[in-house]
Image (tube, rainbow, N blue to C red):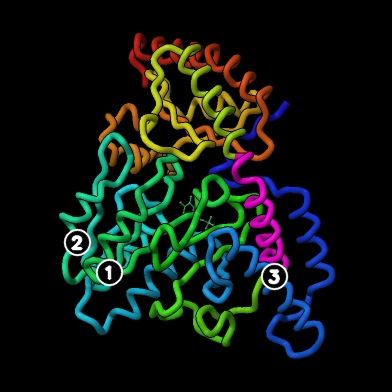
Amino acid sequence: MRVYFDYNATTPLSAEVVDAVIQATRDQFGNASSVHHFGQQAKAALDDARSAVGRLINGDPSEIIFTSGGTESDNFAIRGAADALEPSSRRHLIASAIEHEAVLNTFKALARRGWRTTLIPVDHTGVVSPARLRDLITADTALVSVMHANNEIGTIQPIAELAGIAHEHGALMHTDAVQSAGKIPVDVRAAGVDLLSLSAHKFNGPKGAGVLWVKRGTRMQPILTGGRHERSRRAGTENVPAIVGMGVAATGTRAKLDAEAARDGTLRDRLEAGILAAVPGTAVNGGDSPRVPNTTNISFDRVEAESLVIALDLEGIAVSTGSACSSGTLEPSHVLRAMGLSAHRTQNSLRFSLGLFSTGEEVDRVVDLLPRLVDKLRGLTRRSQTVGIN
Ligand SMILES: Cc1ncc(COP(=O)(O)O)c(C=O)c1O
């Protein structure tokens, strides 16, 4: 039995999405910009997907720009707004310290071009405080970017309140809703944002398709220049099969949202309670804050998270850490670090993220297995410390 508890990394496609992608690959091969029948068929398929994604987020289809995924949408939101505002006196950008790298590294790139950037710190709750934004925002802030739900710990941010503050100061508000769409309601009007990013592969759609929702009237410069696709806002021949799949996934996820959130929440809570009860020295990170229902991030005292990921994988269970392993050195999670967790705890935390195909049987298997694996790893750590190797 293989268990996939890494839905925040990517999700499996639902059966109707697979069928739609196959059918569009075969039948809608036309270039959506072509005037002939084949092109118009492809364009009609894109229009259906545009409407479906619009319904998922309460946005107008004309405000939906198709992209290659969450990374491009975040880049487009920030670079596109910054480029449009470059001639103004606004030269300051604000994001939270717990954003995805797609936002953080875009900020770094713009800082090298002379933009002033500020990261809003968070505390152990993993939630961005509107009061902190009020302290940091200035008359020359061009854009505030805060994610709707965090990918590592699942905490939900008070976007409507943050957007209100941004607007009071004449700044644009962007939210990365990549990890909230399909898990909790996402409503661009209720959130009061100007820009919102989505990625299809996080809600049972295909990889390589995403959306930047741009509120009508928002001034943006394209970051991909070329033909007049997407109303001249994003050049490049549209990936019709992936976009069709995203539309079908958006419709499916919208229809199932409440039921699936309740089901995932029950499974996640059972997993979390089971692990805390069965494994001593465990604690949930961000557990007291509002969270998306599918995610839990748990610290295992005296266990290196990477070793536990490998031990679980050998048993057929897929989970992940918040740490990125690059060139053999473990980078502690910037999210857990921003929350003020100790260096040790940032490196012994695991993320379990559930979804559409997760079952109670899978939860029970993980809860059954973990105490033995953790005991074994703790034993190894003790032995290596005793003989002085590490
Ligand atoms: C919060 C968040 N933003 C952006 C991305 C990037 O999305 P994509 O993989 O579609 O480029 C991810 C993916 O991990 C994410 O979790």
Q: Residue at x 61, y 33 (%)?
A: 263
Q: Residue at x 37, y 47 (%)?
A: 157
Of discs 2 and 3, which sits in the foreground? 3
Q: In the visual, does 239 lie left or right of 215?
A: right
In primary-sequence order, the first of circles 1 and 2 is 2
The part of the image, by quadrant, that contains residue 318 is top right
User: Pointer 1: what residue?
Assistant: 171
Q: Which mark is residue 48?
A: 3
In primary-sequence order, the first of circles 2 and 3 is 3
Q: Is residue 179 visible?
A: yes
Q: Position of residue 357 (x, y in %)?
A: 69, 37
Amino acid carrying mark 3 in the image: Asp
Q: Position of residue 84 (x, y in %)?
A: 34, 80
Does the residue at mark 1 contact the one at mark 2 (Cβ under 8 Å)? yes
* Magenta span contains residue 319: no
The yes-or-no answer for disc 1 within 8 Å of ligand 1 is no
Judging from the image, what secondary structure is the residue with disc 2 in? Answer: loop
> How many numbered marks does the figure carry?
3
Q: Position of residue 49 (x, y in %)?
A: 67, 67
Q: CA distance from mark 2 to mark 3?
A: 39 Å
User: Pointer 2: what residue?
Assistant: 137
Does 359 sit above or below residue 277? below
Q: Which residues are magenta?
A: 241-260
